[in-house]
Amino acid sequence: MIAGRRSLLFGGLGLVLGGCLFDRAYYEKNAQQKAFLDGLQALAKPALASNNPLQIEEAAKQSVALWAKIGPFSDWRAILRTVEGNAQNVTITLEIGPQVTLYAFNDGTLSTLNSILKSTGDLFSSRPRETLPAGLSEPAIAALKTLRLGQTVSISGRMGEIAGSGLIDLSRLLGKSDAEHRQFVQTPRFVARIETLAASE
């Protein structure tokens, strides 16, 4: 009887500990997303520890290059942090990891684009090009109407492009202030096109 109780006790404890071990953070559940965040951290940590502005500048540049290589992504997890505007002109921010943010916007004008990019620390700029397509698909907009701020969501879309219209011009990373480079490395912010958006379990 005593042995049976001990088995029950340790068995229950094993389930609790096992549950803790496998209760991963939302941003660690997708391998591609975790690899991207790990890559950003690998660039940021030594650069910030060095306190060398040249190394921090290079880390900022390499972080953007890493973002540009992602391309399509699927079933990433994020926390919906802000929603601004209306269905025709909306901007959202999604936290995809600790202090790492994605912007998506549904306005095709370059003036709005420049405004959003300036809010990221003005690290990037776009070359003049045709009118940009929407950064949120119609299904994503429809789903957005059913969600609440602070909710964990599943997202699919594309990075490495501004609203699907081409790579950001990285040249303006050079010549920016040390403070702007440091801020970006500490709290990176990127633009993405969001194709699907749904509540996550």
Image (tube, rainbow, N blue to C red):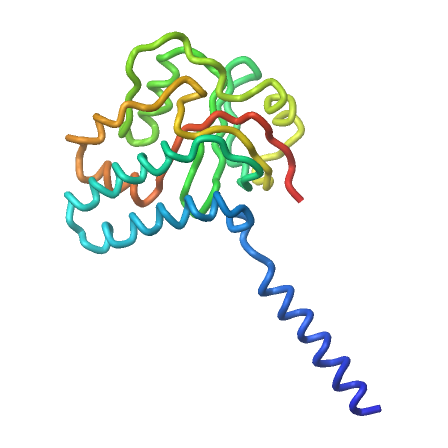
Taking the spot 34% from the left edge, 25% from the top edge, the residue there is 117
Q: Is residue 11 or residue 145 the one in the foreground?
A: 11
Decide if residue 111 is on the left or right side of residue 18: left
> Residue 197's x, y, as percent?
60, 30
> Residue 127's x, y, as percent?
28, 15
Residue lying at the far right of the rendered structure = 1
Taking the spot 51% from the left edge, 20% from the top edge, the residue there is 90
Residue lying at the far bottom of the rendered structure = 2
> Residue 39's x, y, as percent?
36, 47
Taking the spot 51% from the left edge, 51% from the top edge, the residue there is 28
Identify the image quadrant of the C terminus: top right
Q: Is residue 123 above or below residue 41?
A: above
Decide if residue 4 is on the left or right side of residue 135: right
Q: Is residue 30 above or below residue 109?
A: below
> Residue 49's x, y, as percent?
23, 55
Decide if residue 184 is on the left or right side of residue 87: left
Q: Quadrant of residue 161?
A: top left
Taking the spot 48% from the left edge, 43% from the top edge, the residue there is 33
Report the number of discs. Answer: 0
Q: Is residue 192 or residue 72 the one in the foreground?
A: 72
Residue lying at the far top of the rendered structure = 130
Q: Is residue 198 or residue 80 the one in the foreground?
A: 198
Q: Is residue 67 or residue 90 the one in the foreground?
A: 67
Q: Is residue 171 above or below residue 46?
A: above
Identify the image quadrant of the N terminus: bottom right
